[in-house]
Amino acid sequence: MSDTGRFSGDIAEAAALVAGGTGGLGAPIAAELAARGATVITVSRSSAAVGLVPTHHISADLRSADEAIRVVNEVVGTHGRLDIVVNAVGVVAFGDVVSTSVDTVEELFLTNVFAHVFLCTAALPRMSQGGVIAAISGVVAEQNLPGLVAYGASKAAVRSFDEGFAREARRAGVRVIDARPPHTETGLASRPIAGAAPRFPPGLAPASVARRIVEAIADGTTDLPSSAFSA
């Protein structure tokens, strides 16, 4: 299935695509991968922020299947391979489910679920044997909460997709990691698409969460539950 050779597992040799790579968690993941020697390509709907580390940035809306294919083709066309994909794309909404609008629910699922499905299905046939796809569903995928019902459902859908997709990807020689970190201080809660965030206790540092995810990519881990992250 793969058309870009074999990935040895050495991050220093990897071409790594980080979706949402300009965001509060995606940027530290991109930086951690770059610090370990990877060639990092970020993708987001916005232009790359000043000071980010990628070799190049692609502006694209991954909620479109055609855009996901374009991004993957550009990475492979430019760098000759695709070894690591990290999806750190996400939006959040707060409020009880009855008062959550249809438009908000659609946006949650388009961004959190559909974009992930489109990116994974575009990437898998082009990835190196031994490659890794890491997705971030989050702790809410383990236990949904009042005021987060629609958001939590979208993240649970990501986790469920990853569980089945991991078995399919294994046949192609690609490992899939579902990461479910506890609340992390990414700033996402201050930018909801609807509602207002409740008062959260202090969250984890994005750099430490990024480091744990990249360690999992490097060491063969296949699942990162919330208990795998420490304060």
Image: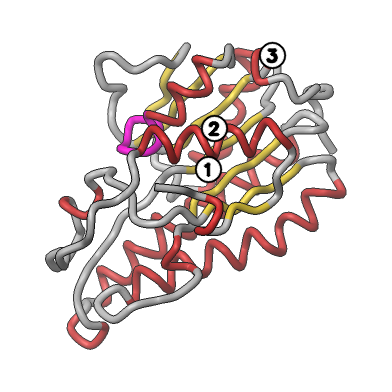
Dot 1: element: helix
Whether residue 177 sits left or right of residue 67 in the image: it is: right
Looking at the rendering, the stretch of residues picked out in magenta corresponds to 21-27
Whether residue 108 sits left or right of residue 30 in the image: it is: left
Can you give x and y, in whole percent of width and height, for residue 201 in the image? 22, 59
Q: What residue type is disc 1 on? A: Asp
Q: Nearer the viewer, residue 99 or 11?
A: 11
Q: What residue type is disc 2 on? A: Arg
Q: Kindly identify the residue that appears in the image at 65 percent across and 21 percent down.
A: 76
Query: What is the CA distance from the residue labelled 1 to the residue labelled 3?
Result: 28 Å
Front disc: 1 or 3: 3
What secondary structure do most residues of the magenta stretch adopt? loop
Work out whether 4 lies above or below 157.
above
Residues at discs 1 and 2 in contact (Cβ within 8 Å):
yes
Q: Which residue is mark 1?
A: 66
Q: Kindly identify the residue that appears in the image at 30 percent across and 73 percent down.
A: 148
Q: Which residue is mark 3?
A: 13
Q: Kindly identify the residue that appears in the image at 33 percent across and 40 percent down.
A: 205
Work out whether 61 lies above or below 82.
below
Label 2 Cα crowd, 10 Å radius (few <14 / some 14-19 / many 20+): some
Q: Nearer the viewer, residue 187 or 74?
A: 187
- Between disc 1 and disc 3, whose residue precedes? 3
